[in-house]
Image (cartoon, rainbow, N blue to C red):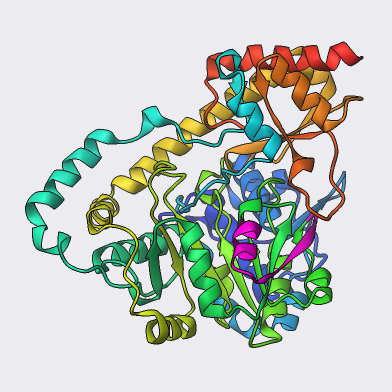
């Protein structure tokens, strides 16, 4: 049986220390593919810990793809070593340390909707009971008083900096604060010189195309956040739609479409909620390493709002060949109107950007940058994210409870509820997705279908996206009653 000294956990919780021990044994080959892990209760007694400690450690390893389970047989080690060899990263496994803090910074949430849902939102607004297509952050939770104090400090103490021309990458205090934040929250060792600050991720996508080249073929997830493909096409570059399987973007389709740059969200995919396991991540890095023209754009969407276990490690965290561009923003953690985003370039690309694009001026005002730098540096941001995670977890639990207590439960199945601010609700109905959404709208419930986000791949019918960040808890039971009425009416 595996043995670990659980008294050496240091500042880690017991379950996270156990998770790291097993993960390291998998990466180093001490645990081979197919090895069976100890049964939870005997293992807990052997280590002198609770069963829940072992359960939580296994759950995190399962989510990240280091292990897999078989019904009534137990947990087994996934085939990671072979993919490490293929990607050329086996020798560097000691550098592949995953984030150890509770935070994960994120990101903008998708705000694009299919045209028919945009029309639904603009009509009959007064009769809406609940809008599950809205991904706006909770306005009442914005830290107005703290921001007001910080802004006054900036106006009084940093007047000279406010009137200076902002460097192309953003003011240094903000880039330093972001670098320290990423080290603490995502275990990313990055220099402030690798960070480029911009007014929204839309702007950063445009910079990336200029940097990587208009002659490249860009790939986006299908289904996926349609705004990305629209931006690429407006920039007149080839944009391929890459289908997904249960682990994320399909490598064979990247090869078949001759894609050079793939844009993905491995830690929490929108809209399916898929978390890309570590085995597929190494396959992606192996794919990128085959050509100097290939890169991966990692949109770390929604990762700080993982509701169970630790945040999923960033793909850039295990990138040792400088192939991953990491993109993030503060739109979801603070507010959608806070148009401050940033990207972390590999060092080689950061040098190229400095040589060719340093004539640019940062598109975010010095006032916002300096205020945000203080907000992060003084520890307010980390506390705010912790509060918001608890707030949204409570709201998610309220919605799950409303579904399970309603008559809708007999016609519905829930999936991907442990990460991000949306989950998937599969409803057993004879109606088409469009018919169901229209009928729900007539009863005051605005809901979007997963099938609306597919472009070329075969859509999954009767699966609906439940964005709950902007839905008041008191409205949730009534909304579920209305959805049941839609199902019952056709039954």
Q: Position of residue 482 (x, y in %)?
A: 72, 13
Residue closer to the observer: 178 or 254: 254
Q: Residue furthest left?
A: 156
Q: Nearer the viewer, residue 3 or 197?
A: 197
**Which one is nearer the viewer's eye here, 354 or 405?**
354
**Residue at x 46% of width, y 31% of height:** 391
Classify 390 as above or below 490.
below
Write the residue at 48% across / 85% down: 348
Which is more toward the observer, 290 or 55?
290
Locate the N terminus by quadrant. bottom right
Residue 56's x, y, as percent?
62, 45
491, above or below 333, in the image: above
Above or below 301: residue 463: above
Q: Is residue 242 magenta?
A: yes
| Residue 100 is at least partly visible in this image | no
In the image, is residue 219 part of the stretch drawn in magenta? no
Residue 416 position (above or below residue 77): above
Observer able to see residue 109: yes
Q: Dividing the image into 4 quarters, which one contains the C terminus? A: top right
Tell me: 281 left or right of 489: left
In which quarter of the view is residue 420 placed?
top right
Counting every numbered tag in the picture gives: 0
Counting from the top left corner in percent of width and height, residue 266 is at 64, 59
Q: Position of residue 326 (x, y in %)?
A: 51, 66
Query: Where are the magenta residues, as a range?
Result: 228-246
Q: Residue at x 35, y 80 (%)?
A: 358
In the displayed structure, does residue 56 sit left or right of residue 165? right
């Amino acid at each position: 049986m595996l043995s670990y000294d659980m008294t050496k956990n240091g500042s880690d919780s017991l379950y996270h220390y156990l998770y790291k021990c097993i993960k390291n044994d998998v990466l180093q080959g001490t645990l081979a593919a197919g090895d069976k892990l100890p049964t939870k209760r005997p293992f807990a007694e052997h280590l002198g810990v609770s069963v829940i400690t072992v359960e939580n450690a296994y759950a995190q390893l399962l989510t990240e793809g280091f292990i897999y389970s078989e019904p009534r047989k137990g947990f087994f080690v996934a085939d990671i070593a072979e993919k490490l060899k293929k990607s050329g990263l086996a020798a560097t496994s000691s550098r592949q340390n995953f984030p150890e803090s509770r935070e994960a910074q994120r990101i903008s949430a998708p705000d694009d909707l299919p045209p028919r849902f945009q029309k639904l939102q603009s009509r009959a607004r007064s009769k809406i009971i609940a809008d599950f297509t809205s991904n706006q952050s909770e306005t009442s939770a914005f830290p107005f008083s703290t921001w007001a104090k910080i802004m006054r400090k900036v106006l009084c103490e940093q007047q000279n900096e406010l009137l200076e021309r902002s460097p192309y990458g953003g003011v240094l205090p903000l880039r330093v604060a972001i670098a320290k934040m990423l080290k603490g929250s995502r275990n990313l060792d990055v220099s402030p010189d690798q960070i480029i600050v911009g007014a929204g991720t839309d702007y950063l996508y445009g910079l990336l195309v200029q940097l990587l080249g208009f002659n490249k073929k860009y790939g986006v997830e299908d289904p996926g956040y349609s705004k990305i493909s629209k931006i690429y096409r407006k920039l007149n570059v080839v944009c391929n739609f890459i289908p997904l399987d249960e682990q994320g973007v399909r490598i064979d389709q990247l090869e078949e479409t001759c894609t050079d740059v793939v844009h993905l969200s491995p830690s929490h995919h929108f809209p399916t909620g898929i978390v890309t396991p570590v085995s597929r991540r190494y396959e992606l890095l192996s794919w990128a390493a085959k050509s100097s023209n290939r890169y991966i754009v990692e949109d770390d969407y929604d990762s700080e709002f993982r509701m169970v276990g630790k945040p999923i490690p960033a793909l850039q965290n295990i990138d040792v060949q400088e192939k991953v561009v990491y993109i993030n923003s503060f739109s979801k953690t603070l507010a959608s109107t806070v148009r401050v985003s940033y990207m972390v370039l590999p060092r080689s690309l950061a040098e190229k950007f400095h040589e060719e694009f340093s004539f640019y001026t940062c598109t975010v005002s010095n006032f916002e940058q300096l205020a945000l730098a203080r907000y992060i540096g003084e520890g307010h941001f980390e506390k705010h994210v912790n509060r918001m995670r608890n707030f949204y977890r409570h709201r998610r639990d309220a919605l799950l409870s409303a579904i399970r207590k309603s008559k809708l439960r007999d016609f519905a199945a829930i999936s991907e509820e442990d990460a991000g601010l949306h989950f998937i609700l599969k409803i057993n109905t004879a109606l088409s997705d469009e018919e169901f959404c229209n009928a729900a709208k007539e009863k005051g419930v605005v809901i979007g279908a997963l099938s609306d986000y597919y472009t070329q791949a075969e859509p999954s019918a009767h699966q609906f996206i439940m964005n709950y960040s902007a839905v008041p808890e008191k409205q949730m039971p009534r909304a579920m009653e209305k959805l049941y009425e839609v199902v019952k009416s056709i039954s």
